Image (cartoon, grey):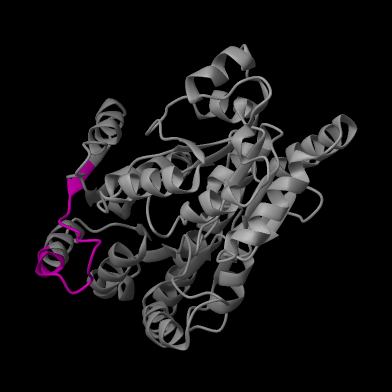
Amino acid sequence: MKALIVMNLAGFLHFLWNDISTLQALGFEVSVAMNEKMPDGSDAVETVKLDRKGIQHYHIDFNTKSPLAKTNLTAYRQLKQILKDRYDLIHCHTPIAGCLTRLAANKYRRKGTVVIYTSHGFAFTDRSSRKAWFVYYTIESFMSYFCDALVTVNHEDYYNARKMHCKKVFVIPSVGVDTEQFREVRINRDLYRQQFGAGQKDIMVLAVGELSVRKNHQIIIKALSLLPDKEKYVFVICGRTTTQSSITEELKQLAQKLGVRICLPGHRLDIPEVNTCADIAVIPSLREGFGMAGVEAMAAGVPVIGSDVQGIREYVVPGQTGYLCDPYSAEKFAKAIQRLSSLSSKERLRIAENCRKKAAEFDMEISKATIKNIYLNVYFNKSLQRKKNDTKI
């Protein structure tokens, strides 16, 4: 049996290793197709891992900026060539790669190939404009004709997907978090915090993830500026800068203008340790399919203040694991930050325990078991039905 996993960019492979290992455990020979030319060079990390594991991988010229880019026509032709190798199962991720792959694989699907699409967050939400709904919902609904299963990572997307045309729709607890990795950190916390400019009495507010407009980090800077004791807070943002290269400088300038302390240490490989240093985690995204960073923080016992959108609602329970806020309201974020900052030691222990318990619901092993059941349900059921049809003929 042969399986192909497809995604837009090589950097996204970081989230799909569980899919690969699960398929291999089921007896599939797995290959991967993606754009391996990441502008920051991060593709090298993932492709080296593939090479070490002996996994075949292909470069595809996906353009993630515009679905209408000419390079996506090239990508489509490249996919058509790769698919001639006849895969038994194709699992595609991310919007552009998902659309092109499903179209390219359609003739093989009619001959028995199983095609699964996982949406890691629809581009339309209950906060989106009518235009966004018309454009993105229409595209996703049409493309749902071309897959045997549609997988979502939050319940809002799940209920919207059920209105589409794919007969099998699932929701999974995202790609899973190694919660033990975040629980078992042993560091000198006070010393470790110093590299981020946070003293013993300071309150470290942490955001982990790419620096982009969608991540909405500026709202936290504005929120901190509204606090009467803003000088005791330091806002740490760990993550790569996207192609919107000016965002880093814009955040620095805004923080300087509003008198907010900020630290931008870039991409970090020590996220468990960094989370242990934090007092409050924030995930203020305008749209977020899930937001693994939020669950990682909670696994470390850190409460999360997040936007009241999509996947963040899956784990932020107001008053129990943190607070949900209007992503456009600096005042509401400020109030939530102040509320968590004023907790007593007893309340802090209570909310930390709540966070760890909630994070355990999204543990990696639970996610792996869920996706395994989907593969079994979709692939082997279709194979059985195909054999029955062949027998009738």
Q: Quadrant of residue 16?
A: top left
Residue 140: horizontal and vertical position, in percent? 41, 78
Is residue 92 shown in magenta?
no
217 relative to 281, above or below = below
Q: Is 389 in front, or is 367?
A: 367
Q: Is residue 373 left or right of residue 52?
A: right
Q: Is 80 in front, or is 367?
A: 367
The answer to whether one can see residue 30 in this image is: no
Q: Quadrant of residue 158?
A: bottom right
Q: Is 386 in front, or is 89?
A: 89
Q: Is 261 in front, or is 297?
A: 261
20 relative to 216, above or below = above
Q: Residue at x 53, y 64 (%)?
A: 152
Residue 141: horizontal and vertical position, in percent? 43, 82
Which quarter of the rendering shows the C terminus?
bottom left
Q: Is residue 45 left or right of residue 320?
A: left
56 relative to 70, above or below = above
Q: Residue at x 50, y 83 (%)?
A: 164
Residue 21: horizontal and vertical position, in percent? 45, 38
Q: Is residue 114 left or right of residue 26?
A: left
Q: Write down the region rendered in magenta.
A: 57-74
Residue 64: horizontal and vertical position, in percent? 25, 61
Q: How many marks?
A: 0
* Farthest residue, direction right: 346
Is residue 61 shown in magenta?
yes
102 relative to 369, above or below = below
The answer to whether one can see residue 153 in this image is: yes
